[in-house]
Image (tube, rainbow, N blue to C red):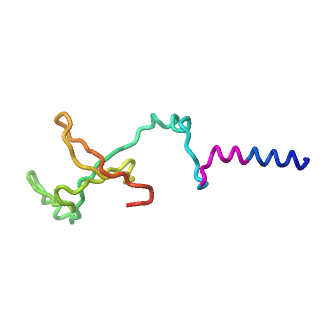
């Protein structure tokens, strides 16, 4: 391969890589890439809080029992997608049903 052909091949590879990566070297997701996953169902859950108790305590619970959670009233609740924390929000009422308004998006790697 001549030096000109080698340079052209290298330039073509660089252009192709630029289409796939941004300046940080991260993959750039194109709209066409996302269309393949738009219909994939995910589990979304909103967690008010949690509590730890012994089995003995759990077995004593009955109708009307109150379980104290680790959150205070008015604190944001955690929003999970497929068991991964993605946001925090507040409880709202929408057409007589509970809903969540997102107040904070959690960036990857942050908890």
Left or right: residue 79 compared with residue 5: left
In the rendered view, tell whether residue 24 sits above or below residue 4.
below
Residue 107 sits inside the magenta stretch = no
**In the depicted structure, whether residue 18 falls above or below residue 38:** below
Residue 55 image point, x, y percent: 21, 63
Q: Residue furthest right?
A: 2
Residue found 49% across the figure and 37% down from its top = 37
In which image quadrant can residue 49 be found? bottom left
Residue 48 versus residue 75: which sits nearer the camera? 75
Residue sitting at the far left: 64
Report the side of 17 relative to 30 (left or right).
right
Residue 69 location (% of width, % of height)? 19, 60
Residue shown at the point (38%, 47%) measured from the top left? 81
Residue 45 in picture, x, y percent from top left: 31, 47
Question: Is the stretch drawn in magenta largely helix, strand or loop?
Answer: helix
Give the residues drawn in magenta, as a range. Answer: 14-23
Which quarter of the image is occupied by the C terminus?
Answer: bottom left
Number of marks: 0
Q: Is residue 84 left or right of residue 1?
A: left
Residue 15: x and y in percent read 70, 45
Asked where in the image residue 5 lies, by quadrant, the reply is: top right
> Which residue is depicted at the point 55% across and 43% down?
29
Query: Viewed as shown, does residue 109 lie left or right of 50?
Result: right
Considering depth in this image, is 108 or 103 the residue closer to the camera?
103
Is 18 included in the stretch rendered in magenta? yes
């Amino acid at each position: 391969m001549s030096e000109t052909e080698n340079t052209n091949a290298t330039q073509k590879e660089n252009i192709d890589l630029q289409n796939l990566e941004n300046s940080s070297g991260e993959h750039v997701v194109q709209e066409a890439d996302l269309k393949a996953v738009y219909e994939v169902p995910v589990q979304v859950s909103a967690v008010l809080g949690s509590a730890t108790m012994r089995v003995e305590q759990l077995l004593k619970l009955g109708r009307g029992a109150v379980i104290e959670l680790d959150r205070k009233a008015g604190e944001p609740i955690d929003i999970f997608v497929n068991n991964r924390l993605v946001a925090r929000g507040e409880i709202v009422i929408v057409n007589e049903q509970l809903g969540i308004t997102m107040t904070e998006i959690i960036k990857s790697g942050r908890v």
